[in-house]
Amino acid sequence: MSENLPPCPQCAGEYTYEMNGLMVCPECGHEWAPGEVTGDGSAAGAGERVVKDAVGNVLSDGDTVTVVKALKVKGSASGIKAGTKVRNIRLVDGVDGHDIDCRIEGFGAMQLKSSVVKKA
């Protein structure tokens, strides 16, 4: 590779790569747009988007959350029960208010709204 890619603004990892217009750090999983990094290495847009859970706790990538109310799942006879733990969430700009990307055991990959979870 002949191009110099910037280090990760979160963990300062040097093994970053570009994927779908975003820069990705394989060490911590942080994703950012190439123009978001300021001179001191911090993300310029880090303070813009804050995702909070049902009780007001700030969520971040990699957190473990608990579902606070039973959820119906399309195409499934049973839904997700209240109290189900979801590990290693990822915050995304989803459609229709679904801003958490996760994998739930027994259901697979899906997106959740932050208003139906609380930080564990």
Image: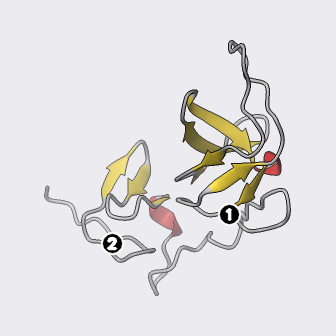
Q: CA distance from mark 2 to mark 1?
A: 24 Å
Please tell me how crowded label 1 is: few (under 14), some (14-19), or many (20+) other residues with Cα within 10 Å: many
Which x, y percent locates residue 1? 14, 55
Which of marks 1 and 2 precedes in the sequence? Answer: 2
Three-letter amino acid code at disc 2?
Answer: Pro
Badge nearest the viewer, 2 or 1: 1
Type of residue at label 1?
Leu
Q: Nearer the viewer, residue 84 or 22?
A: 84
- Pinpoint residue 101: horizontal percent, then vertical percent: 59, 43
Task: Find residue 7 and name its label.
Answer: 2
Q: Look at the numbered disc 1 and give the secondary structure of its residue.
A: loop
Q: Position of residue 90 (x, y in %)?
A: 56, 51
Name the residue located 46 percent from the left edge and 87 percent from the top edge. Answer: 40
Q: Relative to the observer, which residue lies in front, 84 or 36?
A: 84
Mark number, residue 59: 1
Q: Position of residue 88 (x, y in %)?
A: 52, 53
Badge 2 density bin: few <14, some 14–19, many ≥20, Cα 10 Å: some
Q: Is residue 1 left or right of residue 65?
A: left
Q: 60 above or below 109?
A: below
99 relative position to 23: left or right: right
Q: Nearer the viewer, residue 31 or 83?
A: 83
User: Does residue 92 appear anywhere in the picture?
Assistant: no
Quadrant of the rendered image containing residue 47: bottom right
Q: Residue at x 85, y 63 (%)?
A: 55
Quadrant including the C terminus: bottom right
Residue shown at the point (62%, 71%) measured from the top left: 46
Q: Residue at x 45, y 74 (%)?
A: 10
The correct choice, above or below, for 49 with respect to 18 in the image is: below
